[in-house]
Amino acid sequence: MARPITRRAALAGLGLAAASAGCLGRTENIAGRDPHSQLTLEINATPADDDPNGIRIARQLEEHLTAVGIGVRLNTVGQTDLWRKVLINQNFDLYVGQFVETEPFDPDALYGLTHSRFVAEPGWQNPFGLTEIAVDDLLERQRRVTGSDRVAAADALQETVCELQPFSVVAFPDALTAVREDRFEGWTGDRQPVSAAGLLALDPVPADGGSADAGSADDGSATDSGTDGNATATDAGTDPEPETVLRLVTTDDRITENWNPIAAEYRNHGTFTGLLYDPLVRADGDEFFPWLATGWERVDETTLDVTLREARWHDGEPVTASDVAFTYAFLRDTSLGNVETPVPTPRFRGRSSVVEGARARDESTVRLTVADVNETVAARALRVPILPEHVWSERTGAATIAGFEFDFETTEAIVSNNPDPVGSGPLRFVEATAGESVAFERNPDHFLVRSTPEDDADASGETADPRAGVPSRYHGKPAFDRLRIEVLPSDISAVESVAEGLADATVSNLGPESVPRIGRSADARLVSGRSAAFYHVGYNVRRSPLSNPRFRAVIARLIDKTAIVDGAFDGYARAATSPLAASSADVPESVAWADGSDPVHPFFDDGGSLDVAAAREALREIGYRFDGEGRLLSRGR
Amino acid sequence: MTPFLSVLTSVVAWVVAMLVVASVAVIGPARLRETWSGLRDRLWDARRAVAVVCAVLIASAVGRPPLLDVSRLFGLQATAFIYGLEGGFVAWVQATFATPALTAYFSWVYVYGYAFLLAFPPVAYLALPRTTTFSRVLVAYALNYGIGLVLYTAVFAHGPRNVMPDMVTPLLFTTQPDVMALTSEVNVNSNVFPSLHTSLSVTVGTFAVLTHEEYPRWTPVAVPLSLSVVVATMYLGIHWLTDVVAGFALAFGSVALAYRLVEPRSDPGVPRDGPEDDQPPSEPNASD
C-alpha cells in the first residue's frame, strides 16, 4: 500500500528538477501510471473445530496459490459468520464450504445456485454472482423439457458450469457419523445418517428388561419393519414407560439459538428445521411421496392443484390451504409488499421460484400457478417448508433494531431467530440454552402417529388413512419421545461422548482422525453414508480477476483433489468434477471424474506435487504477468 | 457434565496436593503458622487488591459471553494476519520436538502445572509479613485478566490447530479429550490473542525472580514451570508465537504497573484504617 505513495513522492521531487529542465510532460507520463502490485486473494473457511475438512482444502489452496506467486489471506470465521459474509454480504474472494443439500439432488438445484436472475439477491441463490446467458438458457431448458431432452439439457448444463467454474467442486464427503446401536437402530449407511428422513426412519431397540412381550427379545426380529414398530407404539400408549430420548451431539451451536428455516446463515443442511416444518412433498432418493399434501394434480401446463392432509400447527391452529398460498407468496417476497422492493427468501429460492402464484380454492385445496415446467421440477417446488400464516404474516415489516430501520433490504422474517417455532412437523420445540443444548419432542398430533393401531393393520390403500401415500417406514415415527442435541467443543469430544454412552450419535462433520477413535470404542460404531453436500471452493465472480473464467480455471487447476481426498479426508470422500456426481442424474463422460484426474480442469501435477512452472505458464498464457520475484501482478483493487 | 466434573476434581486434587508440598517446602511451617494467626489482618490490609481481583474475575465471568459476540461481529479479524506473519512456526515446533513423553509433560503442565503456578503465589506472598507483594501479585493478575479481556474482545483470531489442522495436531485434546470439557468451559477457541496462559505464567515467573530473596526455593521451581507453560501453549498447537510474544508483553506490563500502583506500606502488620484510605496510590515509588 505504501509503495505507490513513496514512489510518487520521490517522483514529485524529481518533477521539480524535471520542470526546470523542461521535460514535465515526460515525468507526467511516467508518474501518472499506477504501478501494479501483487494480487492478494482472501480465502474464507471455518476453523477446524467447526469443520475439520474445509480448512484443509483451504490450506492446500493457500499453499498452491502462494507457490505460484499469488498472495493469500487465509481467514477463519465461524459458520454463521462465513455464510453471512458469503451469502448475505457477498463480501469475499474465495470460500471453502459445503453445499446445502445432503440427499442426492436433481439438476434443477443448479437453477438456484447459478441463475443470473438471482444475481442481486442475498442468500443461497447465485452466491457467486454468475451472469452467463448460456447457463441461464440451459437452466430454463432443463425445467421445460422432459425425457432424453432433459438429460441432454442437464448434461450440457453440467459441462457449461464445469467449464465456467463459478465454483470448483472438490469432493463429495462420506458423512462420518459415530452411532450407538443399543437404543436406536436403522442408521442409514448409504447416505447421510443424520438427516430428516434418516432420523424419522430410526427404529427403537426393544429394551431388555422391558414389558411382558419379551418373546421377541432377539435382536434380529426388531429390524423387520412395520409390525414391530406398531407393537412398540401400542406399548407406549398403554404403559407409562419412561420416555425415550434420542441424544445427539454436535459442534454446531446454531440450532440452539435460531430455528428460522429461511435464515441462510444459520442453517447447515436444515435437518432439524426440516423436522419442525413439513413440506408438501418429501423426497427420499429418487422417490417422491406426498407429506403434508395427500396428493397433487397437474390440471394443465401452468396449473397444479394440491390437496392437503388434515393437520394442525404446533399451537393447535389448523393447517389450511391459505397457509400454503401464503408460504409461496411469502418466499417470493418476505415483506409481502410492505417494503418497496421485494425481499425474497435467502433459502429455497430456486425451487420456490417455480411457483408464480398460489390461491386457496377451499380449506384443503390450493391451486398453484407454475411456469411451464416438467413434473420433476414441479414436485421439487413442493418441497419447501410450509409456514403458518398467523405467525409469519406478523414478520413482514422491514427489520429494525430498537425501532430503527437499518437495512431496507431485509425483513423481520429473515432476521428473526424464530423463537418458539410453530411448525406442523413431527417434532416440536421444547426448550433451548443458547450455545449449549436444544430439546425437541415428538408431536403427538402429527399424521405419522395419528392412526390407531387397529386401522393400521390393513390400511394399505385406503383413502381414509391419515398417512396415505407415506412410506410405511415412517408410520408411527419418530421412534423417540424427545430429541436432545448437545453442543460440544470439537469432533473429538463428540466422538468421546458417543463412545462413553452419553449420546447416541454425532451430527456435525467428523475428521478422519475420529475413525480409529470410534474403532477403539466397544459400543460406538462408524456409519458413513455418502453425502451429496459437496465441498467446493466458491469464487466471487463479481470481483476481478475472479470474474475472468480463464483465471478461475487456472485456480481450479491448483486444487489437487486426489491429494485432498487421500490426505484431508483419509479416503472418506470421492473427488468429483460435476456438482451432480452424487446424484442419480446422468453425468456425461466429459465431466465425470476418471482415472484420478479431473477431465475439465486437471491439477498441475508434477509427480504428486504442484507443477509451479506449468501453473505460471498457464497464467502467462491467459495474460497475467509476474514481477522479478515471481509475484503475480494486478491492479490494486 | 460428567467429563467436566471428573477433570475438575482431578485438577483440584492435584493443585491442593502440590500447594501443601510447596507450602511446607518453600514457605516453611513456622511462617505458615504465623500467617494463620495473622490471616484476617493481612487480608484486611490487602482488601483493595483482593476486591480488585474479585471484581475483575466476576466481570470476566459475566462479561465474557456477550463480549465474545462483540468480538465476533466487530473485532479485528486477525487470524489471516497472524498466520501470514509467522506461518508454520508452531507446526515446526511440533514437527521438530514432539515426542510422546514431551506431549504428556506439556499436557500436564498446561492444565495442572499452570493451575498450581497461579494458585501458589497468593498463598506464598500472603505468608510474608508485609502485604505489599501479595497485593501486587493480585493486582497483576487483575491487570492480566482485565487487559486480556479487552484484547480478546478487540481481536478475533483462531489458533494454529484450527487453521493448520494438517500440520498442527491438537495434541492436548487428542491425548486427553476430557480436558477439552474443562478448557471449553473457561475459554473459547477464538480467544487466542494474547495467550493468557503465557502472560499469567510469566507474571508469576517474574514475581518469583523479583522475590528471590524472600523465597529462594520458589524461583527455581516457578521459572522453569512458567517457561514450560509458555512452550506448552505452542507445542500443543493452541497458541501462535504472536500470542505468546503478546503474552510476555502483557505480563511485563502488568507487573510494572502493579509495582507502580501498589506502594510498600511504611508500617507493616499494624491493622489500621489509616493512610491507605486517605491517599490513593498515585505517586510512583522508588521500588519500581
Image (spheres, rainbow, N blue to C red):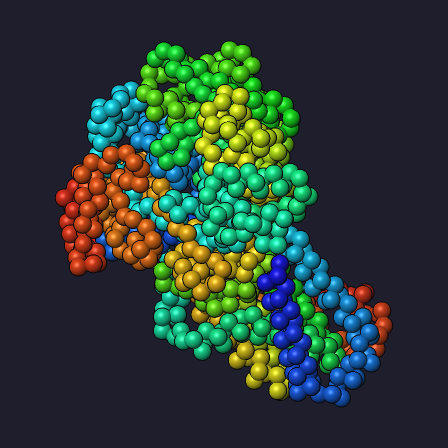
Q: Residue furthest front?
A: A215
Q: Residue at x 71, y 62 (%)?
A: B54
* Residue A397, x across and y down, in percent: 57, 23
Say which of A151 and A526 sits in front.
A526
* Residue A94, x across and y down, in percent: 34, 44
| Residue A411 position (above or below residue A270) | above
Position of residue B207 in the picture relative to residue A574 (left or right): right
Say which of A447 and B112 sits in front.
A447
* Residue A579, x across and y down, in percent: 30, 38
| Residue A508 position (above or below residue B194) | above
Say which of A191 and B285 sits in front.
A191
**Dividing the image into 4 quarters, which one contains the C terminus of chain A?**
top left
Number of dots carrying numbers? 0
One can see residue B171 in this view? yes
Q: Residue at x 16, y 46 (%)?
A: A618
One can see residue B74 in this view? no
Q: Residue at x 48, y 71 (%)?
A: B232
Q: Which image quadrant for residue A547?
A: top left
Position of residue A604 in the picture relative to residue A468 (left or right): left
* Residue A612, x across and y down, in percent: 19, 55
| Residue A160 position (above or below residue A363) | below
Q: Residue at x 23, y 53 (%)?
A: A68
| Residue B184 position (above or below residue B253) | above
Say which of A635 and B163 sits in front.
B163
